[in-house]
Structures are given as C-alpha cells and as structure tokens.
Image (cartoon, rainbow, N blue to C red):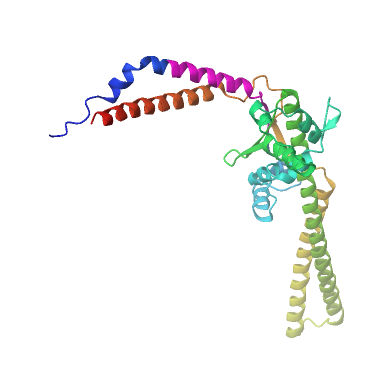
C-alpha cells in the first residue's frame, strides 16, 4: 500500500491542545516572575570622559597641526587611543586597587563592603560551598572587576565608565572614584613620560650647547688669526666655520626651546581628560530585566510543549502501525 503520509497535521495537533499552551504560558510567566524577584536589583552609574591633551599642547605654544603631530608621533595619545583607558579600567589589577578605596557611609573599603553587602540569588546561596580566605579574596576581586565596565568610542573620542552595585548611591560614588583613580594613574603616567622627555631634552640641549660653544670658539679663533681676506683658502675655511657656527646656533636654540617646553610639561598639573558627564545616582535598576526573562521562559516553554505534543502524536501513530 502506498504511503499517504501521516493522517494528522502539526497545526491541528497544536490547535487542539490550546489549553495546554495556555497552561504552559501561565506557568512560564509565574516561573519568570519567581526568578526575576529572586535576583537582586542592580543599579548602574556612568561617567563619560573626553580628551584634553590637545588643548594643553595649544596652551604651551604649539599650533593646531603641531599639537596633532606631537600626539601622533611621540606616543602622547590620550583619548586618541581610547583602548588605553579601556584596558586599564577592565584589568584585574585596577580592581585590586579599587578594592582599597573607602566607601563613604559604610566605614570600610570597597573590598569589605562588597564582601558583606553583595547580594546573590537564593539558588547561588543554596549551592554555595565554604571558601577559604584565598578563594574569598579572589571571588570578591572578580566581583569588583565584573562590576566596573568601560566602553570606548574611537569615532567621538570618548570613554564611558560604568559601575554597577546593589546600592544606587554606592554605584554613583564608586563610578566617581573610578574616574578619580584613573585620572591619578594617567597623570602619574603622563608625569613619568614627561620626566623621561625632559631627561632626553636635557641630553640634547647639552650636546647642542657643547657643539655651539665649540663652533663659536673655532670661528672666533680662526677670524682672529686670519686677517688676510685675499687668501681664497682662508676665506673658504672661514665660510665653512661660519656655516657650522650658524647651524650649531640654530640647533642650540631649538634644543633650548624643547628643553623649556619639556620642563613646562613637568611643572604643570595636567588633567588627562575632561569629564563630559558626571556620575549621578541612578533611579531605575538596570538588572534584572523582566521582559527578557519573561520572553525567554515563555519561548522555551512553548517550544518544549510543542515538541512534547508532536512527539507524543508521532509515537501514537507509530504504535498504530
């Protein structure tokens, strides 16, 4: 006998069990609600930063093109390499440093605040095992590292720093603390780089000064001892010494200017970035997201129900044959 295919359609089977789908839908909503209410609320505070290096260079006497060229060629990138700030903020070492920051109003540092106030879902508490001091330390640092996030925009030259916490006030305070700590670190790096540049400028200045003094003395001695301008060889040698003297003097002036500018960069207090948006206390929780959980549970529930119904129908058809 020819096989005419199954005597039923998937649509008809699913439609005939609409009460099952309604029950699954209600159960999914209930389960999603239980999960959402079991997850502690988290609040996120943000700080947005932008570059300020170029404006500093302009104040120190560089024109617009020179300020850009200095940034591009000498490695003083600032926010023109936004990944630098991103990488610093997202590292575990930065989380370790932030764990030592005092939390105002709690009388403790961020490490012990997190250790005592970090809220977990009930199922994590249920299956959580006892940890020794090393495991506890690593876990808290990992939590802090995960709560400090950063995102960069190479197009707009900005960096967004976000800190998440169960307490919205603490989230805002720590976002501002991250900004301050990052600024201090970048200022220290900038100063260290400026000191290195100053040492190099001092070396170039001393070399240029010695060359200038030597060329000046050589030219003065030669002109004092050779007064016969009719001697072509003496005249040529004098021109050569004069050119060397002028070249050495130009190099000396340039090295002197570079040294003065390098010293100015060391002496000044440099903000490494400008704050576009300060941290404010968030009013609404960023997690958990009820819509996402509801859609996920309903979708999975309906898919599982469909597979069970169709599998059951297929099994019944198989038994008939």
* Residue 206 shows in the view: yes
- Would residue 28 appear left or right of 194 to someone viewing this image? left
Quarter assignment of residue 162: top right
Where is residue 169 drawn, in percent x and y? 75, 23
* Up-down relation of residue 86 to residue 262 (above or below): above
Is residue 286 or residue 236 the one in the foreground? 286
* Up-down relation of residue 12 to residue 107 (above or below): above
Where is residue 101 drawn, in percent x and y? 81, 36
Quarter assignment of residue 173: top right
* Residue 57 shows in the view: no
* Up-down relation of residue 262 to residue 112 (above or below): below
Count of numbered tags: 0
Is residue 273 or residue 101 the one in the foreground? 101
Which residue sits at x=74%, y=46%? 93
Is residue 37 or residue 3 the one in the foreground? 3
Q: Quadrant of the N terminus?
A: top left
Is 283 contained in the magenta span? no
Is 46 contained in the magenta span? yes
Which residue sits at x=77%, y=49%? 189
- Residue range highlighted in magenta: 23-49
Where is residue 58 drawn, in percent x and y? 72, 44
Where is residue 272 drawn, in percent x and y? 74, 42
- Would residue 218 appear left or right of 288 to someone viewing this image? right
Q: Quadrant of the C terminus?
A: top left
Which residue appears farthest toward the left when viewing the image?
A: 1
């Amino acid at each position: 006998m020819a096989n005419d295919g199954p005597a039923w359609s998937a649509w008809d089977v699913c439609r005939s069990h609409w009460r099952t789908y309604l029950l699954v839908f209600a159960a999914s909503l209930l389960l999603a609600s239980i999960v959402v209410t079991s997850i502690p609320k988290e609040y996120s505070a943000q700080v947005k930063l932008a570059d300020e290096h170029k404006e500093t260079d302009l104040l120190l006497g560089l024109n617009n093109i020179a300020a850009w060229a200095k940034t591009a060629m000498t490695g003083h990138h600032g926010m023109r390499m936004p990944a630098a700030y991103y990488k610093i903020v997202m590292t575990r070492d930065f989380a370790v440093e932030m764990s030592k920051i005092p939390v105002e109003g709690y009388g403790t540092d961020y490490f012990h605040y997190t250790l005592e106030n970090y809220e977990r879902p009930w199922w994590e508490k249920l299956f959580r095992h006892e940890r020794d001091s090393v495991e506890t330390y690593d876990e808290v640092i990992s939590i802090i590292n995960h709560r400090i996030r950063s995102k960069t925009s190479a197009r707009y030259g900005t960096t967004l720093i976000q800190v998440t916490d169960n307490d919205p006030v603490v989230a805002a305070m720590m976002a501002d603390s991250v900004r301050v700590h990052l600024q201090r670190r970048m200022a220290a790096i900038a100063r260290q780089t400026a000191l290195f540049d100053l040492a190099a400028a001092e070396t170039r200045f001393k070399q240029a000064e010695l060359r200038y003094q030597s060329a000046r003395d050589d030219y003065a001695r030669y002109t004092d001892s050779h007064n016969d301008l009719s001697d072509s060889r003496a005249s040529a040698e004098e021109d050569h010494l004069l050119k060397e003297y002028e070249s050495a003097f130009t190099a000396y002036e340039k090295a002197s200017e570079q040294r003065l500018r390098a010293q100015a960069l060391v002496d000044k207090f440099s903000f490494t970035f400008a704050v576009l948006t300060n941290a404010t206390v968030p009013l609404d929780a960023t997690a958990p997201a009820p819509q996402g959980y509801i859609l996920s549970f309903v979708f999975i529930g309906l898919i599982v129900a469909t597979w069970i119904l169709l599998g059951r129908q297929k099994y019944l058809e198989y038994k008939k044959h």
